[in-house]
Each structure stands twice: as C-alpha cells, then as structure tokens.
Amino acid sequence: MSEDTGRKRLQDLSKSLQEKLTASGDAPVNRRALKTIERLARDLTGESAMPGLRLWRDAAGKFRLQRPPRNAEIALEWQRDITAMVLTAEKFGEPRRLVRYVYEPTEDIFRRMEGEGELHDDLTDTLVEYLYPEAR
C-alpha cells in the first residue's frame, strides 16, 4: 500500500468519525436520547402531570413510573452500549414486557426495533394499560 493510499484511508476514517461524534466524543444519538429522557420526565411531572403518578430518576438516562396503589411499574432507559431506548412494563405477578427503540434520524423519532410503533405513542398506551386503566 502506498503512503498516499494509507493517508487517504486515515483521512476518510477521521472524516467519518467527525460526522458521527461531536468534539466532546459524545455520539449525537446519545445526546438526543438523553434529551428525550429528560423531556419525558419533565412532561410526566410538570404542571400537567397525571394524578398520582410517581417518577424516580435512577440515572440521567433512566426513570421509573409508579402509581400507588396500582401494583405495576414502567421504566424507560437509554442503553448506550446497544444504542437503544428500552421500555419495560410489569404488572407484578405477570410477565415483564420489554420493547426496544432505535433512533430514526430522518424522522427524528425513536421507532420500535421490531415492527411498527413509536416511543411516545407506546409510552402513552403503556401508561393506560398498566397505570391508568380508567382512561380506556
């Protein structure tokens, strides 16, 4: 391999990484996911919060929802290592439901990894199914 070819490969790698990473070394999708978690947590606890909903922030990229006396829990977590948002819902005594979402930059949404669906719509449906059955 000639020196020019090697330099070109190195420059191509550098350009590719510059497009994928910011100066801080954070992938743009990671920043977008953490921002989504933050906005959802704020929306769920703000002025227009649902009555009785409790939100626990376990980490910058994770929160859990409960509504006493409902015996259920919903968790939303950004898993950077697999680059996916993970929604888990569990009614105690029943099997846990787990759905993964990947970021779709063309539509600027987190879409379901398998099949059709979007994070915000699925979270709304999950809240109704697990914590607010009276909203059906």
Image (tube, grey):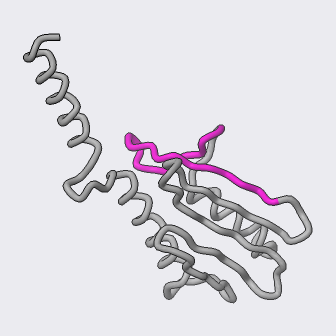
Residue 110: x, y in percent? 50, 50
Magenta span contains residue 50: no
Residue 122: x, y in percent? 64, 57
Q: Is residue 9 left or right of residue 57?
A: left
Between residues 121 and 57, which one lies in front from this camera angle? 57
Looking at this view, name the residue that lies furthest to the left.
Answer: 4
Between residues 12 and 118, which one lies in front from this camera angle? 12
Indicate the quadrant where residue 112 lies. top right
Indicate the quadrant where residue 3 lies. top left
Q: In which quadrant will I find the C terminus?
A: bottom right
**Whether residue 51 is situated above or below residue 2 in the rendered picture:** below
Q: Is residue 74 left or right of residue 82?
A: right
Q: Is residue 95 left or right of residue 77?
A: right
Residue 36: x, y in percent? 45, 64
Between residues 102 and 39, which one lies in front from this camera angle? 102
Magenta span: helix, strand or loop, mainly? strand
The total of numbered circles placed on residues is 0
Q: Residue at x 63, y 62 (%)?
A: 123
Looking at this view, name the residue that lies furthest to the top.
Answer: 1
**Whether residue 45 is situated above or below residue 25 in the rendered picture:** below
Q: Is residue 43 left or right of residue 3?
A: right
Q: Residue at x 58, y 73 (%)?
A: 63
Magenta range: 96-114
**Whether residue 44 is situated above or below residue 52 in the rendered picture:** above
Residue 22: x, y in percent? 23, 52
